C-alpha cells in the first residue's frame, strides 16, 4: 500500500497538486469480487497526452478550433465502426486523417496540406501526461505487467513510448490493428488475454473514454476509468470498478485491491 511519503512524493513529482487534475476525483468503492490484479492494459490516452494535438487545431483555427476538434473526434470513432461493420477496414492513422478532412469540410475550412500535416504530426511527437512516470514506477514495484490495448496502430504506440522514454515500463503493446478490429469489439479485448495468458478477471483495463470503459466492462474486465476530461458517464449500463481523472487514484486502487486479496488468501 502507498505510504504517506510515497504518495506525497508522487503528487509533488507529477505536479498534480498544482495543476488541478485532482479536482473532482472520485474513486468508487471496490467490489470485493475483484481478484488480485496481475496486469494492467491501458488504452493509449490515459498514458499519452493529446492536448498538444487539440491546441494546434485551435491555433490554426482560432474561431472554430473546438468545434472542429469535437467533430473530428466524433468521426474518428464512428468511422472506425462504420468501416468495421461494413467490412471496409482502415487503420487508426488513416481514419484519423479522413476524420480530420471531414471535420474541416463540415465547417468549410480550407487548410493547406502543411497546416493539416502540422496537426497530424502532433501524434508523432505525443508524450505522456505529467503523472504517468511516477505512477508507472509505483505500479512496477507491485510486479504487475503493464502494457497497451489500443485502437492506435503499433507504430503510433511505439512512437509515443519512444518520445517519452518509457519503454522499460511496458511489457506488451497490443494494437487492435493486428486483427483489423476495433474496441469495443469483444475480439479486440480478447487480444490481451491471448497475449498474457491470464484470466480476464486478473487484467485491469484502464480506459480513457467512457464508451471504452463500458466495452471493457461488457467483456468482463475489471475496469478503471481514467476520466481525465471529467466527462459524464455514458448511458450504457456499465459502471467502472474505479474512476478518477488521474493515475494517482489508479495506483491506490491497485495497491489496495491487491493488498486486500493478499490478506484474504
Image: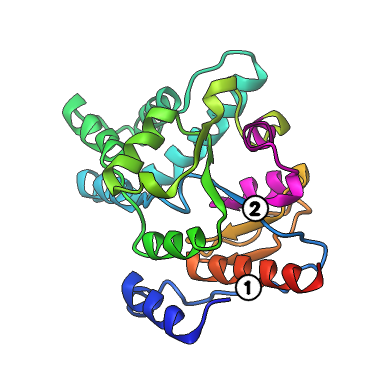
Q: Is residue 191 magenta?
A: yes
Q: Is residue 258 magenta?
A: no
Reply above or below: 51 against 199: below
Which residue is under mark 1? 27
Q: Residues within 10 Å of mark 1 (few under 14, many from 20)?
A: some
Give the SS element for disc 2. loop
Residue 171: x and y, percent? 49, 42
Looking at the image, residue 162 sits to the left or right of residue 29; the answer is: left
Q: Which residues are magenta?
A: 188-217
Closer to viewer: mark 2 or mark 1 = 2
Q: Quadrant of the N terminus?
A: bottom right
Q: Residue at x 45, y 45 (%)?
A: 170
Looking at the image, residue 209 sits to the left or right of residue 163; the answer is: right
Q: Is residue 140 visible?
A: yes
Give the SS element for disc 1. loop
**Residue 38 tag number:** 2
Residue placed farthest to the top in the image?
A: 88
Amino acid at each position: 500500500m502507498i505510504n504517506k511519503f510515497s504518495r506525497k512524493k508522487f503528487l509533488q513529482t507529477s505536479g498534480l497538486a498544482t495543476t488541478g487534475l485532482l479536482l473532482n476525483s472520485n474513486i468508487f468503492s471496490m467490489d470485493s469480487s475483484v481478484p488480485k490484479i496481475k496486469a494492467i492494459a491501458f488504452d493509449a490516452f490515459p498514458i499519452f497526452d493529446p492536448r498538444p494535438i487539440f491546441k494546434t487545431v485551435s491555433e490554426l483555427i482560432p474561431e472554430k478550433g473546438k468545434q472542429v476538434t469535437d467533430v473530428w473526434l466524433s468521426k474518428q470513432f464512428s468511422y472506425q465502426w462504420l468501416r468495421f461493420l461494413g467490412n471496409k477496414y482502415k487503420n487508426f492513422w488513416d481514419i484519423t486523417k479522413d476524420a480530420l478532412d471531414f471535420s474541416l469540410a463540415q465547417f468549410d475550412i480550407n487548410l493547406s496540406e502543411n497546416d493539416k500535416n502540422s496537426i497530424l504530426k502532433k501524434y508523432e511527437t505525443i508524450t505522456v501526461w505529467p503523472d504517468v512516470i511516477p505512477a508507472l514506477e509505483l505500479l512496477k514495484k507491485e510486479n504487475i505487467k503493464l502494457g497497451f490495448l489500443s485502437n492506435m496502430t503499433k507504430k503510433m504506440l511505439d512512437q509515443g513510448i519512444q518520445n517519452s522514454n518509457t519503454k522499460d515500463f511496458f511489457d506488451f503493446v497490443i494494437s487492435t490493428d493486428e486483427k483489423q478490429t476495433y474496441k469495443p469489439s469483444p475480439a479486440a479485448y480478447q487480444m490481451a488475454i491471448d497475449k498474457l495468458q491470464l484470466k480476464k478477471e486478473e487484467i485491469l483495463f484502464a480506459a480513457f473514454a467512457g464508451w471504452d470503459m463500458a466495452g471493457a466492462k461488457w467483456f468482463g474486465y475489471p475496469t478503471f476509468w481514467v476520466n481525465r476530461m471529467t466527462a459524464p458517464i455514458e448511458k450504457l449500463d456499465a459502471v467502472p470498478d474505479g474512476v478518477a481523472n488521474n493515475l494517482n487514484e489508479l495506483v491506490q486502487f491497485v495497491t489496495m485491491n491487491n493488498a486486500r486479496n493478499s490478506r484474504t488468501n
